[in-house]
Image (cartoon, rainbow, N blue to C red):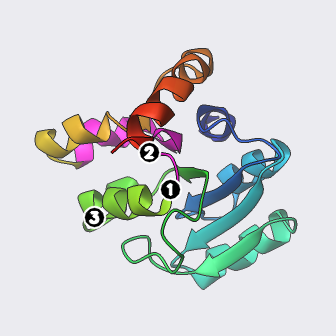
Amino acid sequence: MVAPFLAQAVAADAQAKALDLYCGHGNVVSALVTAGADVTGLDLSRAMLDMARASVPEARFVDGDAMELPFAEAAFDAMTIGFEMPHVQDPPRVLAEARRHSRHRSAIAASPSWISRTIPASVAAEARDYLWGDPPSERRRSMASRRLRTSSR
């Protein structure tokens, strides 16, 4: 299952404030909560949010669109995008919003299968700079250097 990998990929822990975009019925939210993170799930579907609330009562859920996130900039330490991206009208816009609302560009992870099929090559090249498909051990080794690099911009 992809959900635990995504939680590991963003190094979710008790210090992390995490957002799962297009959370659906809460699979990735559950993995983030299990990792100890303070989690918010966002989805367009009220029915999916109702299922997620029932499945993961420890998390907060927000009815909203990932193309216009209703949060302050840099509000989250970790962000995940599980399974909805192939169905999004404007994936580059979602990625830009995710980056804008993440404190650390290196703490955004998405299910990797959609990247090459869904967005133009130029955007995919930029996305590789902040979307991870690396094994969690490799991600942990490189997070510190990436945070330093991105904080200097």
Q: Quadrant of the C terminus?
A: top left
The verdict on residue 55 being magenta is: no
Q: CA distance from mark 1 to mark 2?
A: 6 Å
**Towards the viewer: 52 or 141:** 141
Residue furthest to the front in view is 152
Give x and y (percent) for residue 107. 53, 42
| Residue wearing tag 3 | 93
Whether residue 46 can be seen here: yes
Q: How many marks?
A: 3
Q: SS class of the residue under badge 3?
A: helix
Dot 1 or dot 3, earlier in sequence: 3
Magenta segment range?
A: 102-118
Which residue is at 60% across, 65% downward? 24
Which residue is at 87% across, 65% downward? 58
Of the two numbered discs 1 and 3 in the rendering, the one whose residue sits closer to the viewer: 1
Q: Is residue 33 above or below residue 66?
A: above
Q: Are discs 1 and 2 less than 8 Å apart at CB?
A: yes
